[in-house]
Image: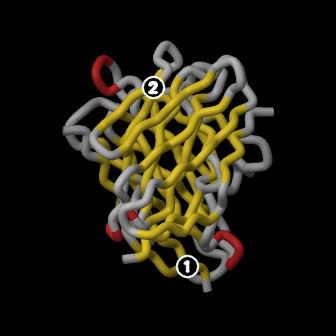
Amino acid sequence: GAVVSQHPSRVICKSGTSVKIECRSLDFQATTMFWYRQFPKQSLMLMATSNEGSKATYEQGVEKDKFLINHASLTLSTLTVTSAHPEDSSFYICSARGTGGYFYEQYFGPGTRLTVT
Amino acid sequence: GENVEQHPSTLSVQEGDSAVIKCTYSDSASNYFPWYKQELGKRPQLIIDIRSNVGEKKDQRIAVTLNKTAKHFSLHITETQPEDSAVYFCAASGSSNTGKLIFGQGTTLQVKP
């Protein structure tokens, strides 16, 4: 149990375009989802926390107009990188937390490698 | 602000030796402390976690200790094997009760055969 998927696994886009990344909880209801960014040889940096049906809470320094997060259902959250630039190239990982037995632990997706050319 | 410091950044041991990674956290309200193993290009995998009402937890070759007073916790791996080589991250829950995690900087563990 507790499987989280992400799509796509890799994406290459041109500078100035937008990219959408999907994060799905496959076998539990994700009341909270988290989006992280990880640059090479660095740690995971939390970008934002989203609760189903609510606006996302962004960490300090993360541009909410550039990184649009939607958590429209208990199984799906999306991250849209708008007007992407080469410096946005990174590994984006989502995680999900549920209720009951799925409350404490965060279940991570496999990540999306974004390359902006 | 919330912060987690992790040391060392790199650790090299001989197969069969023990490895210890230490973390300190800043927020006394943190109550959940997971450890993750991450291989290159993969998702972090939870290897062990501990909650603030427990001082120590062990799972086969892996153990975690927590000192709430000093606000630090440690990962102990005994009888290391080459397949233990990876990047290890500690994390601490944030104080806002949203469930968010603050990650340490990571430790690259190399186990030499």
Residue B59 visible somewhere in the drawing: yes
Q: Mark 1 lies on which chain?
A: A
Q: Residue at x 41, y 38 (%)?
A: B63
The image shows residue B97, relative to residue A65, as above or below, that is: above
Front residue (pair B30, A34): B30
| Relative horizontal placement of residue A111, taking residue B65 as reference (left or right) | left
Q: What residue type is disc 2 on?
A: Glu
Q: In this view, does B5 lie to the left or right of B65?
A: right
| Residue shown at 57% from the left, 49% from the top | B21
- Which residue was labeled with disc 2? B56
Say which residue label 1 marks. A115
Circle 1: residue type: Thr
Q: In this view of the protein, can residue A19 be seen by the observer?
A: no
- In this rendering, is residue A4 above or below B2? below
* Residue A53, percent from left and from top: 47, 27
- Place of residue B14 in the rendered image (x, y in percent of width and height, measured from the top left): 44, 69
- Label 2: state its secondary structure: strand
Q: Quadrant of residue A77?
A: top left
Which residue sits at x=54%, y=57%? A80
Residue B81: x, y in percent?
33, 64
Q: Please report the residue visible at 77 percent of the width from the left and 42 percent of the height from the top.
A: A60
